[in-house]
Image (cartoon, rainbow, N blue to C red):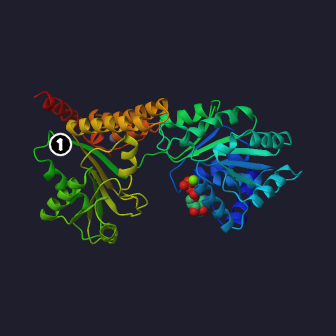
Amino acid sequence: PAGTMQRALVQLEKSFGYTSFKSDLQKRAVLSITEGASNVLVSMPTGSGKSLCYQLPALLSKGVTLVISPLIALIEDQVSQLHSKGLRGDALNSKTAAVDRKRILADLKSDRPSVKLLYITPELAATDGFRSLLMSLHERGLISRVAVDEAHCISEWGHDFRPDYLKLGDLRLAFSDVPFLALTATATKQVQRQIESNLKMPSPVTMFKMPCFRSNLFYDVKHKDVLRDSFKDLRDFVRSSLGEGEGREAGIIYCRTRDGCQSLAGRLTSGGVKARAYHAGLGGKERTEVQHQWMEGQIPVIVATVSFGMGVDKGNVRFVAHWTLPKSLESYYQESGRAGRDGRQSFCRIYYSRFDRNEIVFLMKRDAGRMNKKSKSPAVSAKVKEASEKSFEALVKYCEVPCCRHGAIADYFGDPKPNCGKSCDFCKNPREVKEAARDMKLCQKG
Ligand code: ADP
Ligand code: MG
Ligand code: ZN
């Protein structure tokens, strides 16, 4: 209702200093959560303002909002961000100073606790002592909601599985009438399902999810084995994506090995396209220099291993090419998504070959074997192994099966089929894509 909207906007400005919501999705999530929605899953990319989805409702509600976060470092970060806005945030964990602990516990036991946001680790949530404190709060109607941040940690499919998160399912069952919400940046369909089932969230779960479709990205796949000269194809792709103008447009080529990066950068440069390699084998100083030159537009093309790109914020990346295969469809979506941040037309291409596929399958088996030897929990590592195999299979399917590329990505992330238009090779020219897929298979047999 309008009342909630009004209160939310007033509080947003008063406490956080923002005059509007960051997105329509953030607004809808905040309103619905403030009004007491339970079993909510918020899935938005990093940086889109998920914290506000429980922080603002917390300030608008009676009682305490419990926030579960996987790492003490993350908790400290969040609490100090709140403090920097002059807001209160409290944390209980093994690093909490004794005086703070005493103060917080006394406050929570008092008739009218002043703690609004209490950050805890999943380990603490599972202890008997903390459980009885929660019981006492609950009996007095003082738990306003439980927010599980970084909720993908509850899934073996997620990239940082934390077994302690599994205990949160019990918490949900023990406080079944308390509103629960889970927040994550990674939500493939499998991870979503596992969050729901491991957190014991009864369906239907209310989803606030940013759709993954980006219409300004043109996706295509080239089969290395079918191309007469795949390097030439790459060079032409780079040239046409960068365009003729002398704008400081840029691009990224991902390549698995250091040698590969090095030799590809050399060949491109001799072929008239300025490129430099970036990988962990370079000294720190050289890496910084390469990144700087690329950011500044002095070098248009960077040929990098996956160690490049995290936190890199550059708008005019006109293409992302994968010369070798990424490790999953999810990684591919993230890596290719570095193109076109400025909203302009950009190009994402994978160079696929069965040879490369087999090599990755081999490497995954080898890594899984090593992990198994080190692991304390064979059941968990078996699941992690299965998960990484499945997500790589999804990538292989994306490359091999001729159908809409945006559709395949959306399906993997549990989104409805997007309106691709002609933003992928298949929708632009289905016959050609089908023929290439057929030729690729023939090449294998021949
Ligand atoms: P996430 O958890 O989704 O990665 P955060 O909650 O850490 O994102 O928020 C990312 C940044 O966005 C923070 O600096 C936060 O202060 C800012 N932010 C959140 N909501 C708004 C808003 N409505 N207006 C402006 N900035 C916002
Ligand atoms: Mg966050
Ligand atoms: Zn399409």
Report the side of 281 relative to 116 (left or right). Answer: left
**Disc 1 marks which amino acid?**
Lys
**Residue 23 in sight from this viewpoint:** no
- Say whether residue 364 is left or right of residue 244: right
* Residue found farthest to the right: 111
Corner quadrant of residue 250? bottom left
Q: Nearer the viewer, residue 413 or 330?
A: 330
Would you name the residue on which mark 1 appears?
Answer: 224
Q: What residue is shown at x 60% (from left), y 36% (from top)?
A: 166
Q: Is residue 279 above or below residue 369?
A: below
Task: Decide: is 124 above or below 56.
Answer: above
Name the spot of residue 174 as percent of width and height, x first: 74, 33
Nearest to the observer: residue 368 or residue 109: 368
Place of residue 55 in the rendered image (x, y in percent of width and height, measured from the top left): 68, 54
Q: Residues within 10 Å of mark 1 (few under 14, many from 20)?
A: many
Q: Position of residue 87 (x, y in %)?
A: 72, 64
Residue 150 visible here: yes
**Residue 18: horizontal and vertical position, in percent?**
64, 65
Up/down of 280 relative to 430, above or below: below
Quadrant of residue 442 within the rendered picture: top left
Q: How many marks?
A: 1
Residue nearest the observer in this picture, 79 or 373: 373
Pick the front one: 191 or 29: 191
Quarter of the image with the C terminus is: top left
* Residue 251: quadrant of the picture: bottom left
Element carrying mark 1? loop
